[in-house]
Image (tube, grey):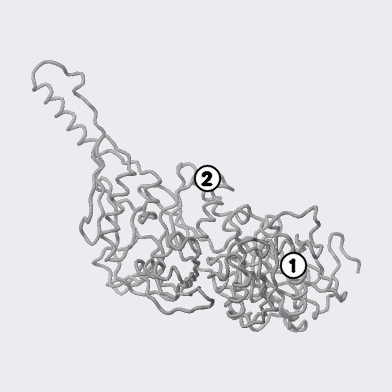
Amino acid sequence: MFPVEGIISYTDTLMENIRNFCIIAHVDHGKSTLADRMLQLTGTISDRDMTEQVLDSMDLEREKGVTIKASAVRMVFTAPDGRDYEFNLIDTPGHVDFSYEVSRALYACEGAVLVIDATQGIEAQTLANLYLALDANLVIIPVLNKVDLQSAMVEEVTRDLVQLLGVDKSDIIAISAKTGENVDLVLQAIAERIPAPVADKEKPLRALVFDSHYDSYKGVIAYIRVFDGKISPSDKLKMIATGSRIEPVEIGVFSPGMKPVQLLEAGDVGYVATGLKTVSDCRVGDTITHALKPAETPLPGYQKAKPMVFAGVYPTEGEDYGNLKDALEKLQLNDASLTYEPETSEALNFGFRCGFLGLFHMEIIQERLEREYNLDVVFTAPSVEYKVDLRDGKTIIIDSPADLPDEGEIVDIYEPWMELEIFTPTDYYGVVMDLVKKRRGIYVNQDYPAANRVQLNFEIPLSEIIIDFFDLLKSSTRGYASMDYKFIEYRAGDLVKLQILLNEEPVDALTAIVHKGDAFHKGQALVSKLKGIIPSQMFVIPIQAYAQGRVISRANVKALRKDVLAKCYGGDITRKKKLLEKQKKGKKRMKMVGNVQIPQEAFMAILRLED
């Protein structure tokens, strides 16, 4: 059988020469730059085709210094002894919002290169990803990056790493990913220290989907690691969790572009072009098997990505509603964790209620809507999902504060609580404690993973950290503290609905669910803030904060003054009184029928109450 034109012939790499690994690091510690140098040193990409952050295809990824979508690439490394190794690098997302995707990518590997910035030291995301890697039983290769910079604290950070990992000082490789210094030693360490995959080519097929993206010609492209069995292009496949049937358009490897092959075997990392029309049919963490001879059990760890943060998204111009719907549909093709449904607001008209993995995910979607689809959109203040027990025995789930029923119907409101880890220099211990205490956080314990560094563990409601908590943490610790969080459970809380009334009409987009003890000062702060933002009209506009059946704060936006007496000169005083009385009646009528225009800053005011 002759090879098909355009398909590279499959070279049967011995299983013992395959190395599957990932690079894990805190945001902006040099993960993508190290991947670039590896691609150059192994000859996977020529110097002519080289660009910075090759694996980060989005402009946003390059600007923010954080990988948003996982990617994979196959390299061939020739060791000093002349032996050829097949390296499969799985590049993981680098932000706490995508921790589930990171855990699936780690499960697809046998080893991890842990990159630590020599100028910053160990940070929260470093620890979080390290613990995920240790849970997946990966071999850890510690790498100290940016040692060429003058501010590098090589000795201190090396000492911290020895204490944290319990490794020998000689096991830590000091490199500069930017200049390429000692990157060859990292490649050698991967070949020597990371074990070859243990797999059985004769067992029924089981392949883990660790990421996916949508291609308009080939449908959903599933990024896979084959654990057992083989895949050829003619096989009929199925997804175990979703039950979707697949007839592959093609199978292949990343080198670094997509290159078709004739066979993928146990131990390999590659892709399957499924032909499926939506990413939700091919979810991250699912297992691919043969449709005719399926595996009995899926690979462990699959769970459906669940949105944690919700916000209303509205076009600033009503005629852009259709364009916004199309844009969200296209974004969802590549991102199954984004959810949306139509929503209407009296203040903002027609829009969508969207669910995101976290605040960073929400920020990414907002920027993509504005950049890639040229849309001008308003995002309402983010909220979380609440469970509400009603007096009639029902339990409802709400993700919009405006949907909360009247107090008389409610027995309990449950809110999501998170396990929060904050990693900070010991100098800022008191500042961090004070910040978390103000946000209803509960101290659990502390640990000292390195000298002069403390890891503080808390439990805190998600609603208290999704808005400006991270910014406040960074500013109060001069940028040194870092944080990581994960969901624990829903807990009953003493919560109330805080409404804002403009001209005695409730504004649903400015409604929030707050703790009873915070309702008064949050209402007062919001009213004061809105007073400076709402433009003056020809009539007085009352702004009221309403909670627990009563108005708790009020301020008036003064009316614009029109001098109706300017043309009235001479004559009796009764002429002036008649004109003023006429104006008074006109203003009263205007107040009854007039609309108050609410600028976008008003919806963002709820985010910046502590400025």
Looking at the image, is 24 positioned above or below residue 522? below
Residue 163 at least partly seen? yes
Mark 2 vs mark 1, CA separation in Å = 43 Å
Residue 223 lies in what quarter of the image? bottom right
Residue at left 58%, top 78%? 301
Between 126 and 393, the residue placed more toward the observer is 126
Position in image of residue 233 (x %, y %): 78, 68
Horizontal side of residue 81 vs 120, given as left or right: right
The amino acid type found where label 1 is placed reads Val
Of tags 2 and 1, the one toward the viewer is: 1
Residue at left 43%, top 48%? 350
Between 476 and 148, the residue placed more toward the observer is 148
Q: How crowded is mark 1: few (under 14 residues within 10 Å), some or many (20 or more)?
A: many
Horizontal side of residue 421 vs 249, given as left or right: left
Position in image of residue 96 (x %, y %): 53, 67
Q: What element carries label 2?
A: loop
Q: What element carries label 1?
A: helix
Q: In which quarter of the image is the C terminus?
A: bottom left
The amino acid type found where label 2 is placed reads Leu
Between 438 and 94, the residue placed more toward the observer is 438
Q: Residue at label 1?
A: 183
Q: Residue at label 2?
A: 375
Dot 2 or dot 1: first in sequence order is: 1
Residue at left 41%, top 74%? 459
Horizontal side of residue 355 vs 607, given as left or right: right
